[in-house]
Amino acid sequence: MAIDFKQVDFTYQPGTPFATKALTDINVTIPDGSYTALIGHTGSGKSTLLQHLDALLKPTSGTVTIGERVITPTTSNKDLKSLRQHVGIVFQFPENQLFEETVAKDIAFGPQNFGVSEADALKTAAKMLALVGLDASLLERSPFDLSGGQMRRVAIAGVLAMQPKVLVLDEPTAGLDPQGRLDMMEMFARLRHEQHLTVVLVTHQMDDVANYADHVIVMDQGRVVKTGTPQAIFKDPQWLVEHQLGLPKTTAFAQQLMAKGMQFDPVPLTEDQLAAALVQQLPASAFGGATTHDE
Ligand SMILES: Nc1ncnc2c1ncn2[C@@H]1O[C@H](COP(=O)(O)OP(=O)(O)OP(=O)(O)O)[C@@H](O)[C@H]1O
C-alpha cells in the first residue's frame, strides 16, 4: 500500500505561544511494496512524519493519502479505525506496551478489539508467535517472564496480528545487543517478503539502511531534503556530513581505500558488495593462486 504526502505542514500546539512547526511542505511518496528508510538527525521530524502514516497526527495543511484514504486537516477521528488496521506501527521499545496476563491474550487483544471472536483471535495469536520466531510453549506464559528480546517479538506479533499492509518500525533494534539487532533486522526482511509488506524504517543505523532499504527519505529541519536509493544517498559523503548523517561502515572503509588510490564504481554499501569489488581488483596472488618460481 502506497502512502503519499502532498504539501504537508504540521505544527504542534498551533495558535499558542508553544507552537512548534515540525513539518514543512512535505511532498513525498512511500512506494507500495518498498522498504523505505526514513533518516535524519535528532529533531528533523521523523517521528512527526511517522505519526502521519496512520493518521495519529493529521496535517495542519496539505493531504496524506494512505492507500485509498485521503487524510486532510479536517478528517474526523471517527472512521480511522480501518485505516489503522492497515498500518501497523512498532514504536520504540514496544515491549513497554505489553499488559495482558498471557502472551496469547496480548497478541489476540488487537484483533478482538476489531471484533474478531476470542477463539479466532487466539488462533491468530498462535500463528503470529510462530511468525516472529517464538515457540508455541510461550503462549500461556506471562509476557513479563520473557527475555527482553522475546518480549519485543511478542509486541511485534501483536502488531502483525492486525494483518497490516504497511509495517512502520521506529528504531526497532534500540537497546538490543549486536546479535539481537541482526536477528531482528533479518526477521523484518523475512516478514516483508512472506507477508508482502510495505516497510517504513526510522533509524539512525546507516548500516541497516544499506543492508535492507531500497528507498530512502532524508529529513532535515522538518523538510525532506533528499529521496532516492541507498546508492544515490550515500554517494556524497560531504553532503551527508552537512546534514549530520554518517556513512555505512563498509562505505566509510571503501572511502578510505579510495583515498589510497583504489577505485570503486559504484562505491560499495554492504560487506558483500565490498568483498565482490575487492576480489575483482586484487591480483590473483592475494588469494594464494599465484604461480611460484619453483613451478
Ligand atoms: N509533542 C510535541 N510537542 C511540541 N513539539 C514537539 C513534539 N514532538 C516533537 N516536537 C518538536 O518537533 C520537531 C521534530 O521532532 P521529531 O520528534 O519529529 O524529530 P525526530 O527526527 O523524530 O527526532 P529523534 O531522532 O530525536 O526522534 C522538534 O523540534 C521537536 O522538538
Image: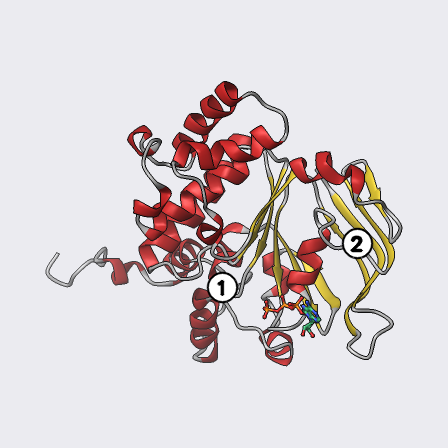
Mark 1–mark 2 distance (CA, rounded to whole Å): 28 Å
Q: Is residue 192 visible?
A: no
Residue that mark 1 sits on: 205
> In which quadrant of the rendered image does the C terminus lie?
bottom left
Q: Residue at x 71, y 51 (%)?
A: 56
Label 2, secondary structure: give it.
Answer: loop
Q: In the rendered structure, which disc, 1 or 2, sits on the residue that comes first in sequence?
A: 2
Relative to 51, does residue 239 appear above or below in the rendering?
Answer: below
Q: Considering depth in this image, is 137 or 77 the residue closer to the camera?
A: 77
Q: Is residue 281 left or right of residue 267?
A: left
Q: Residue at x 16, y 61 (%)?
A: 292
Q: Residue at x 59, y 37 (%)?
A: 197
Residue that mark 2 sits on: 58
Number of labels in the image equals 2
Relative to 227, does residue 66 appear above or below in the rendering?
Answer: above
Q: Decide: marks 1, 2 in contact (CB < 8 A)?
A: no
Q: Is residue 163 left or right of residue 50?
A: left
Relative to 246, does residue 74 appear above or below in the rendering?
Answer: above
The image quarter in which residue 69 lies: top right
Relative to 74, does residue 130 appear above or below in the rendering?
Answer: above
